[in-house]
Image: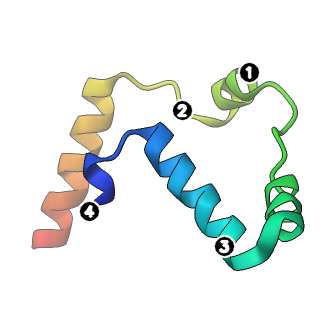
């Protein structure tokens, strides 16, 4: 079985079964509780942090960097 052929539901189910098997019910719950949904506004923060470049501009920059490395 490879994870590439599994659905997200199947991966989640198998993963939780592994947690239960290895950590027991209380440990599995404690593990799951460690993950937070986060806070803030990702979209607004992303717009502030990322450069305002088109895909074409980013592609040109990548090509320049590759050419510089190959020299």
Residue under circle 3? 21
From the viewer's side, name the closer residue of 34 and 43: 34
Picture coordinates of residue 31 (x, y %)? 81, 64
Determine whether the residue tagged by mark 1 lies in a helix, strand or loop. helix
Closer to viewer: mark 3 or mark 2: 3
Q: Earlier in the sequence, mark 4 or mark 3?
A: 4
Closer to viewer: mark 1 or mark 3: 3
> In which quadrant is the N terminus drawn?
bottom left
Residue under circle 2? 51
Q: CA distance from mark 1 to mark 3?
A: 41 Å
Residue under circle 4? 1
Q: CA distance from mark 4 to mark 3?
A: 19 Å
Q: As drawn, is 17 to the left or to the right of 23?
A: left
Q: Are marks 1 and 2 in contact (CB under 8 Å)?
A: no
Determine whether the residue tagged by mark 3 lies in a helix, strand or loop. helix
Residue under circle 1? 44
For mark 2, does the 10 Å Cα neighbourhood hold few (<14), some (14 to 19), or many (20 or more) residues? few
Q: Earlier in the sequence, mark 1 or mark 3?
A: 3
Q: As drawn, is 70 to the left or to the right of 53?
A: left
């Amino acid at each position: 079985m490879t994870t590439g052929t599994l659905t997200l539901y199947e991966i989640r189910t198998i993963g939780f079964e592994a947690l239960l098997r290895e950590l027991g019910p209380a440990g599995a719950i404690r593990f799951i509780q460690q993950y937070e949904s986060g806070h803030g506004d990702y979209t607004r923060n992303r717009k502030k942090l990322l450069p305002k470049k088109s895909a074409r501009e980013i592609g040109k920059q990548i090509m320049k960097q590759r050419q510089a490395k190959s020299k």
